[in-house]
Amino acid sequence: MSERSGGAGPTAGAASTEPGGGPDAGVATRRRIGLIVNPLAGIGGRVGLKGSDGAETVALALALGAVPMAGARAAETLRLLAEGAAPGGLRGHLPGGHSPEIDLATYPGEMGEVVAREAGFVPTVLGSIQTGATTGADTRQAAEDLLSWGADLLLFAGGDGTARDVFAAVGGRVPVVGIPAGVKIHSGVFAVNPRRAAELVTEFLAGRAGLEDREVMDIDEDLFRAGIVSARLFGYMRMPYRRALVQGAKSGNPGGPSTLRDVAFGVLAEMDRDPGAYWILGPGTTVKAVAHELGIEKTLLGVDLLHRGRLVAVDVNEAQLLAFLARKPESVRARLVVTVIGGQGYLFGRGNQQLSPAVIRAVGREGVVVAATLDKLHALGGPLLVDTGDAECDAYLSGHIKVVTGEVDRVVWRVTA
Amino acid sequence: MTTIDPKSPAAEGAPADRYLEYSAIDTGYRAVRWHEKTLYEQSRPGSTNAILPAVEKGIVDAVGDVVAALPAAARRARPPEMPELSEPEILRHYIRCSQMTYGYDSGNSMGLGTCTMKYSPRINEQLAALPEVKALHPLQPEETIQGILEIMYGMRNWLCELAGMDEVTFQPRGGGHGAFTDACMIRAYHHARGEDFRDEIITCAVSHPCNPATASAAGFKVISLYPDEVTGELGIDALRAAISDRTAGIMMTAPYDTGVFDSQIAEYARLVHEAGGVVSLDQANFNGVMTRMRAGDLGADMVHFNLHKTFSTPHGSYGPGAGAVAVKKAFRDFLPVPVVEFDGSRYHLNSDLSNSIGKVGTFMGMVPNVVKAYAWVLAMGAEGLREASEWAVINNNYLIKKLLEVRGLDISWPNRRKLQEARFSLAKLHDETGVGTLDFNYRLADFGVQTYFESHVPRIVPEPVTPEPTESISKEDVDQFVAAFHHISAEAYSNPEIVLTAPHRSIVHREIHDYENLTQVPFTWRVWKRTHPDG
Ligand SMILES: Cc1ncc(COP(=O)(O)O)c(C=O)c1O
């Protein structure tokens, strides 16, 4: 599986503090935004098809009378952007009340051109499509073309499938904001709604946003139709996030800013308290940042096993983990470091199925170290979620749990199934 | 409620200022603006004010050349770079600066939540300015300062009674300093018991940020709890998740800065004690509960009050604060020194406490504030304190009822009764009009009332608004404040540009809050010159 492609390796700590728009972002300059609308995203949902992947599903959905939604969702975001009227809008935030001028490029027709023009933009139109029969390949091509055009940010409307296509094409090379328009939204790269998407773009353009690695996830639609949620983690893209909730030096966060690096140091402090333990390291950039501070190259998407500062196994599956736990001496504890899916809040059951109920029970609730930046937690606006597929295990995990948010900072957050 | 007259200048796009003039609630306020330079920039070399006479011969003969006695290394090579100006010029400068400020004495300041902006009686200022107080030397022998020690001891007795505690220190210079004193005592307490491994302080996101901050400054790790979405309380389950064998204590504010009083504090205290921890309450927001609850009775080991809030001594803009910390007997020995003692006939300053955390400030503490606070408490009496807190709570609940009629404004934890203050949210207004709390607040300044306190961070409540009407304000003050809110809300819905470009009558347009670069702010003239070589 391809990891974050163009990224600067595991120094993820830097990514979360970097100002969104680069050094000159506060100045009203022309910024380039690339727009992709997956016109067929979400089409299966309204007619109960639980997804829109695959030409057959699309055909079936259309036959069932489904109406494409993505265009309308994208139009709302674009309208707010064009007006500069998103809440906390551009005027108030830029020196002198200027709006940055947006250069918009997009793909023809229903892939962006139509809604862009409707919103009052005069877009640069790239590529070509076959109207009415667009596919994931078009999304991938569009993402690539927009990147070559020089987009500072890709704004796309779709669902998990669309996010995967964008990711496959551009990886972590350009920040993205997803406008949720699909049936499946498990990835962390989506704003809560089209209005918030406009706000995030605004914050980004104003140079006020931070950038954060967010999960690209998708579930198996066939299993989903059979009632089973099996979300897989495909990688990470960078997404702006609002920093308004937690303001730098004023954050009431005594130990300093809650960056990935600070969180990593906090986890190391927990490790120091249990030096003999086997440490199971879950997927994600947060946990990878911990390994990085130890000078260890951890897999980004996999579950690795650490003992006394050394990796003893990488990318293990559930069976391997259980075998390992069974073999270890009784006196040595097993501990587990996990993070939270950004924007979604899942702790277990999405993208880390290796950490099954059996593994969780073997480690025990008190053996779990949850790590996340304060921004990530605050942006959730709600509890952490568990969906292990085992109601008893979910109940066992529910309640309140300590989260490492900095070198000396912890918060207690609610967990529900 | 104010509505926009379609024929009004605002609707026609006239300057927002004109629009306000058409409304009944215009106070006519316009900030005085001077292009006032700093004294350094105004300096004219050679100008001077008082010219001191030369030292008389008799004195020179008696003490010799005092400068010669200084070691060479301690002497300045150059005289200090001080501005050179005449006395009237200096006076004029400070008068102008004061004209450009807005403070409690200028008008309605009930917006400043968690600050308890109550009236500071002028007569108490006069008492503190008496030569018997003002001219005391901090190192005078004890027998010559019996009167001031009696005042301090008297105030100590009142605070012990109000807090349900056994001893008081007046050493901390403010609330944050009081919290720091608590954190240091907690550390010293565990050290004395050989339990240095206790390195975690539990606090919460609706406590004043000085609680986590001072705990951290004292070397602790900090665990923050969050209020439940429905009850606004921390909850036993959350606390249990935070408690461990490393728990050093809990430091929390009561009531919270949301105006909610957590009904389970006694149980939290019990659980923390059971785990071997210490319980510290921050009662800087004591105003709404004076004489109605006592920290000691709830199980707290220590509590701090702000004399400069609840007890009427002036504050704001970093004026002289005074945080009084009251402790239970078991913690007396850990207090900063000196403490005032009474042996039945004489008052003493005792600096000999075996486990003392030492000094947290110089000399006897913020003596003038103690004098003013004591005068206030004596004038009020126990009944007066009770009544004052009742009025404060009633005023606040009247405000809540009135403000909730404002379009676009909601209250957090709506089903909880609020005490001295409440946290409102303009999230709805923000979503519907694009006008957020910052914009709203800037506009409020145009009405000749003090802007409001938004929120401590982290900002759990979006677009927050936290006013606090104390017992000192009138119904008319509340009505004026509410009328301004209605007016601004109506503007936001009909002509948001007015609000988004506010203030229109102040001396500065909008502050640039660049907190992330706090370290680059030149706080002194010397730093300014270094960082701005070209002026
Ligand atoms: C609850 C609480 N604690 C502490 C403080 C800090 O007090 P000071 O500003 O005197 O340090 C405040 C001040 O607003 C407060 O409201």
Image (spheres, rainbow, N blue to C red):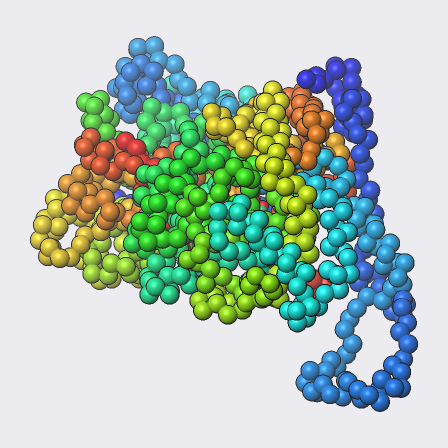
Total residue callouts: 0
Q: Quadrant of residue B454?
A: top right
Q: Is residue B393 left or right of residue A43?
A: right
Quadrant where the image shows the N terminus of chain A: top left
- In percent of width and height, residue B240 lies at 31, 43
Q: Determine if residue A92 is in view.
A: no
Q: Determine if residue B402 is in view.
A: yes
Residue in view at x 66 percent, y 45 percent? B378
Residue in view at x 77 percent, y 79 percent? B78
- In percent of width and height, residue B315 lies at 67, 48
Residue in view at x 84 percent, y 64 percent? B43
Q: In this view, does A25 lie to the left or right of A403?
A: right
Q: In which quarter of the image is residue A312?
A: bottom left
Report the front residue among B164 and A140.
B164
- In percent of width and height, residue B471 lies at 65, 34
Quadrant where the image shows the C terminus of chain A: top left
Report the front residue among B379 and A68.
B379
- In percent of width and height, residue B437 lies at 60, 33
